[in-house]
Amino acid sequence: MSSSCAASVVYGNSAFFACGHRVYSYWNISGNEQWSRLPNNPNVEFGLAVIDGLVTSVGGDGPTNTLLSLTGEGEKKEWSNVFPPMPTPRKSVACVTTEEALVVAGGTVNGVYMVGIVEVMNTNTKEWATVASLPQGSMFLSAALFQDALYIRNRTSVFTCSIPDLLHPQRMGSLWKEISSLPEDSSTLVAFGGHLLAVGWLHGFY
């Protein structure tokens, strides 16, 4: 099992990182920095998102491979079932939250089959729906929101779809558009300072 940090999410002045079962938080307020160890998650290879203010693991390889949210305070913090499970349990997903939905893309089912499934949960009604699939079955993805569009990196390929089209499709056919390929494999997509960045890369993993 790799101990590399495979999932992260930023919320307010805090950032959260997952390394295997371990989850850490970091915050920096007025120059005061602090790292904290959070309770272990029962799964590995999950994504991280923030839903209704709750840090939530999405998918994963383990006993509860759909959604688990960090609840409670202090020593009573624990990973709990708060939201409805996603229709297709899987690991190694990409996930992001918009103003109205959690978007979960790709991953592997039963640890074997790479899928391009994209499922969304309306964060108001807590109902799930299946939307336009990715053109390729994918795992170990990276995703970022940039200028009202979702960008997903699959190895060196990058696909994009506008959030309104994805959540409220008005036309038939593929909604995903492939843009220029990245020069390196498995970069992390980050929206920062008015730019979409591809940070780092990974060699010899596949």
Image (cartoon, rainbow, N blue to C red):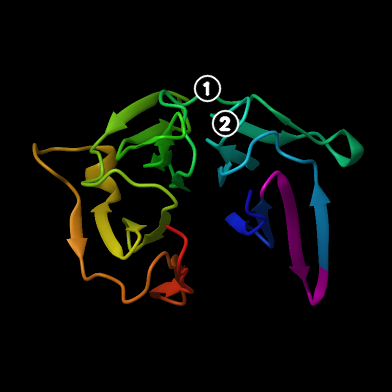
Circles 1 and 2, Cβ within 8 Å, touching? The answer is yes
Looking at the picture, how far across and down is residue 150, in whole percent?
33, 54
- Tag 2's secondary structure? strand
Give the magenta-colored segment's residue range. 20-33
Which amino acid is tagged 1? Answer: Pro
Instruction: Name the side, left or right, on which 177 lies relative to 3.
Output: left
Q: Where is mark 2, residue-wise?
A: 67
Does the magenta segment cover residue 25? yes
Tell me if residue 198 is in the magenta stretch: no
Q: Which residue position holds label 1?
A: 84
Write the residue at 13% across / 44% down.
Answer: 174
Q: Is residue 179 left or right of residue 28?
A: left
Q: How far apart in space, not on screen, are marks 1 and 2 (Cα)? A: 7 Å
**Mark 2 nearby-residue class (10 Å; few <14, some 14–19, many ≥20):** many
Task: Give the quarter of the figure containing the C terminus.
Answer: bottom left
Give amino acid for label 2: Leu
Magenta part, dominant SS:
strand
Image point (74%, 54%), residue name:
24
Please indicate, yes or no, whether residue 185 appears anywhere in the rendered image.
Answer: yes
SS type, badge 1: loop
Total number of numbered labels? 2
> Between residues 98 and 205, which one lies in front from this camera angle?
205
Badge 1: residue crowd in 10 Å (few <14, some 14–19, many ≥20): few
Q: Name which quarter of the figure residue 158 lies in.
A: bottom left
Query: Where 169 sits versus 97, above or below?
Result: above
